[in-house]
Image (spheres, rainbow, N blue to C red):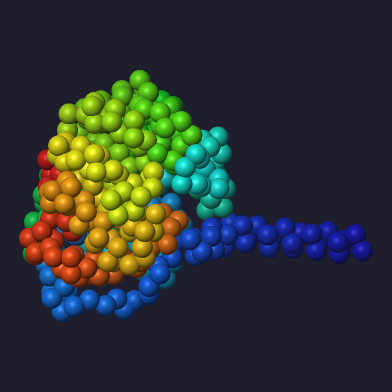
Amino acid sequence: MKKLVGLALLVLLSAGGVYFFFFLAAQFEARTNIAFHAPPYQASAKARELHKRLFVADLHADTLLWDRDLLTRTANGHVDVPRLIEGNVALQAFTIVTKVPRNIQLANNDSTTDSITLLAVAQRWPISAWTSLTARALHQAARLNDAAARSEGKLTVIATARDLTRYIERRATGLNTTAGLLGVEGAHALDGNLDNLDRLFAAGVRMMAPTHLADNDMGGSAQGTTKAGLTAKGQELVRRLEAKRMVVDLAHSSPQAFDDAIATVTRPVVVSHTGVVGTCANGRNLSDDQLRAVARNGGVVGIGYWETATCGSDAASIARAVRHAVNVAGISHVGLGSDFDGAVAEAFDTTGLVEVTDALLVYGFNDVEIQAIMGGNIARLLLTTLP
């Protein structure tokens, strides 16, 4: 009898282990990274013809957080290489997440908790990544670089302005391909040591935000508890990022940290994914004064697609936010920042971006303006800021 009980326990433990390590994370993602609308996506003939000619760029997707092969088309989440190519996305920023508070709120998140540890264990990340945020960042960067190496030219990682120039030239010949740029959400990924920036740079990271969903030793988050500005370490981080010609990302910064960064930087910044208070009023989104500050800096604001950013669940709500941002900041300072695969519900997956092109036409933008919004502004900024 004892042997039977022992065997039963062993079977249960084994089944639990299989579920934990192979199904738990996938099931969580399936419940969070959803699209309100499924393909086929609808758009006018004019929008479809225009969309084929665009250089589409997106400043933010958290796809590397999830245990999916980027080269394999799946029904999960919003982004993979086949879907990027189908959606005519020329450049996708893959932004690395290393720490997320439990029970995320729109404001007042506690920085002492973390839900990524469980995900890292469940997805069988290296043991070093269970405890080190820098190791988590390096693991995710390696995933993108590995996918590019296996892609037979379908995926290119952009690390320098020359890389981007050559890629744009190749793509202009009709090459059926896409490209990725590595970023990091929150400088807590440095494990408290600014010298770890060198390791992330060597791994290909070219964009970093000082904060993410909670305050850290670099400064205050828009969704943190203190709403503090940049610390002395945060200001030193900004200077080091600029010295390396890495892009400073002010998404998730508290208003004071945003102002401190703008006062510190000497080169254009981005706000990789955000909404605007003018169409969706909450503390996560940018005020008109912040939009004007980014414009004066020469930077670009990436308009997000999720409901907190747009107060909507369709392409029209995205276009409405874009229209407001352009009216305030100017046509040269607005782009896209989807937050695809960021554990949020989106209007569509990345194959549905033609709906945004169509909605921009409805909101009165002409072809040249749409080319700038859909990717031209981002390409210009990267060509002038990357190493």
Q: Is residue 98 above or below residue 352?
A: above
Residue 50 as seen in the image, left or right of residue 214: left
Residue at figure coordinates x 18%, y 69% from the top left: 362
Q: Is residue 72 above or below residue 149?
A: below
Name the spot of residue 30 as percent of width and height, x first.
49, 65
Residue at figure coordinates x 16%, y 41% from the top left: 295
Residue at figure coordinates x 55%, y 48% from the top left: 103
Q: Quadrant of the N terminus?
A: bottom right
Q: Is residue 57 at all visible to an observer of this figure?
A: no
Hey, which residue is sitting farthest top in the picture? Answer: 232
Nearest the camera: 167 or 335? 335
Residue 371 as seen in the image, left or right of residue 32: left
Residue 99 as seen in the image, left or right of residue 169: right
**Numbered disc total:** 0
Residue 158 as seen in the image, left or right of residue 138: left
Quarter-of-image position of residue 361: bottom left
Hey, which residue is sitting farthest right in the picture? Answer: 1
Quarter-of-image position of residue 80: bottom left
Name the spot of residue 17 as percent of width and height, x first.
65, 57
Nearest the camera: 259 or 157? 259
Residue at figure coordinates x 80%, y 63% from the top left: 8
Name the spot of residue 326 as percent of width and height, x first.
17, 52
Q: Is residue 102 at all visible to an observer of this figure?
A: yes
Q: Quadrant of the C terminus?
A: top left
